[in-house]
Amino acid sequence: MIKVVCIGHNYAYEVKELLKLFYPPEEILISINDETVEAMVSIDEVIISSVNVIDEQIIVETEIQYNGKIEKIREVRNLMNCNVLHKRKVEKNLVKRGIFQLLEKVKKTYIPWGILIGIRPTKIVHELMEEGKPKEEILKILQEEYLIQQEKGQLLLSVAETEHPFIYPIDEDKISIYISIPFCPTRCIYCSFPSNPIKQWGHLKDDYVDALCKEIVETAKDFNHRGKIIETVYIGGGTPSTLNITQMEKLFNCLKDSFNLQTIKELTFEAGRPDTIDEEKLQFLLNNGVTRLSINPQSMNDCTLQTIGRNHSVEDIKKAYFLAEKVGFKNINMDLIIGLPGEDSSMVENTMKELLDLKPNNLTVHTLAVKKASQLKEEKESYRLEEEEEVIKMLKITQDYANKMGLKPYYMYRQKHMLGHLENIGFCKPGFEGIYNILIMEEKQTILAFGAGAVSKFVFPKENRLERVPNIKNLELYLERVDEMATRKKNYL
């Protein structure tokens, strides 16, 4: 158990998020200006974090008490002629720096991302690039100010350099569209997305497509006179390829009738499971403008596929991939997850060897995050999850093989509860970047989202503001309240 006392500041939320890198959430106590330690609770460590502002100086002092010892750290910053927002940002970072440096020393834990606990660390690099700072200075700031490891700083810089031309200059007239198809053949044990197994919910697919089209049509009425340009469309899930041809045809016709799709640069369709793919569906998708296809194995080990709840084999994945190539798809993405139950680094290397033979031009590597809404969270004790050092080794293997395949990192993000405090990385051959992935992660473009569980994001760049407008996740409630989903978006359009 650890207790943190905040004196002269109230960054309790940020402090708690940082402490989760070192402690389970239930072992963290935070108080404001209260230095008493509860007698009824067993406290192993105490941190006192204090902030003093004297004229233009910010003084942050941090002390940790542990095992009868005391360690201290003190930082002072002069902030002449800085606005209130900048001063607050510096103050908050100094608080986090003090706590991080002491805990890293006491706990001797590998935390490669330093005090960057947010989902989108590339945002910092983009801001520095827009300020005109050179690469060497940006890397120095990442390492010295945010305390991240050099390799992660170089990864951020590399990703941001690739992303930058797709984001800047910001064009408020461009938007993207996301379509949610929340059906799957089975629900994987790690999944926290809206995903309804076909066996129980497949009878609602026709009703769902009807409701989805209604939401699209109603929203488009307000959208089309705004002069906006649609840049990308992403059809995800769930597993969109659980729809049959008739249902797909209705959806694609609705999109074409409702929006001008002549300007789009990319149309992605997640045909994630090989047991939902056949030649007729693939040909339909190609004929209807899909430019980027996802076939997502997650692992190329049959035993793992069975463990996570998949009804297909590695051989089925290969057949689906070759079929997509035969039909004519040039841009195929494959998703992997490292740290899956029962897998070690040798099994991850086997997966990468299999993919080396397939040679996809897009590869997305996810580090397992144990989410609250997943079966894995509920039954975590039933599965063997790899230790931190092994997961770090796994990520290194995927990066080495991606390099062998000629794939470069083009986008990345982080999640809470990730094994090894690592990251998710998208790799591609130059020219095959997933544009939607970049746009949704960097949050500089409005995303109109349709379907159960979809979240629209309305971006107001001049105000540096983003508004999230979520749809209902529950499938049956979505069908009942679809009119409300369209109205929610109209209020922002």
Image (spheres, rainbow, N blue to C red):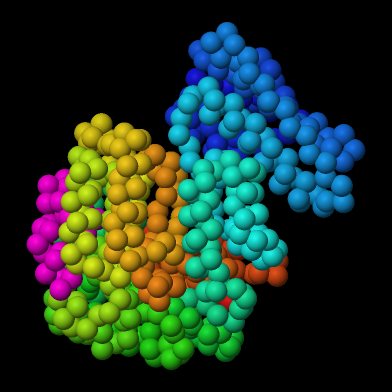
In percent of width and height, residue 100 lies at: 58, 32
Numbered disc total: 0
Task: Give the left or right position of residue 355, taking residue 374 as reference.
Answer: left
In percent of width and height, residue 99 lies at: 61, 30
Residue at x 46% of width, y 30% of height: 109
Task: Give the left or right position of residue 209, taking residue 155 as reference.
Answer: left
Query: From the image, which quarter does the C terminus lie in?
Result: bottom right
Residue at x 52% of width, y 15% of height: 44
Residue at x 30% of width, y 49% of height: 397
In percent of width and height, residue 477 lies at: 36, 61
Of residue 200 and residue 261, the one placed in the foreground of this image is 261
Q: Name the quadrant containing residue 256.
A: bottom left
Dominant secondary structure (helix, strand or loop) of the stretch shown in magenta: helix
- In the rendered view, would you say 106 is above or below 238? above
Q: Is residue 321 on the magenta stretch?
A: yes
In percent of width and height, residue 276 lies at: 16, 69
* Residues shaded magenta: 297-322
Of residue 245 and residue 452, the one placed in the foreground of this image is 245
Q: Is residue 198 visible?
A: no
Q: Name the quadrant containing residue 383.
A: top left
Q: Is residue 60 visible?
A: yes
Of residue 95 and residue 477, the one placed in the foreground of this image is 95
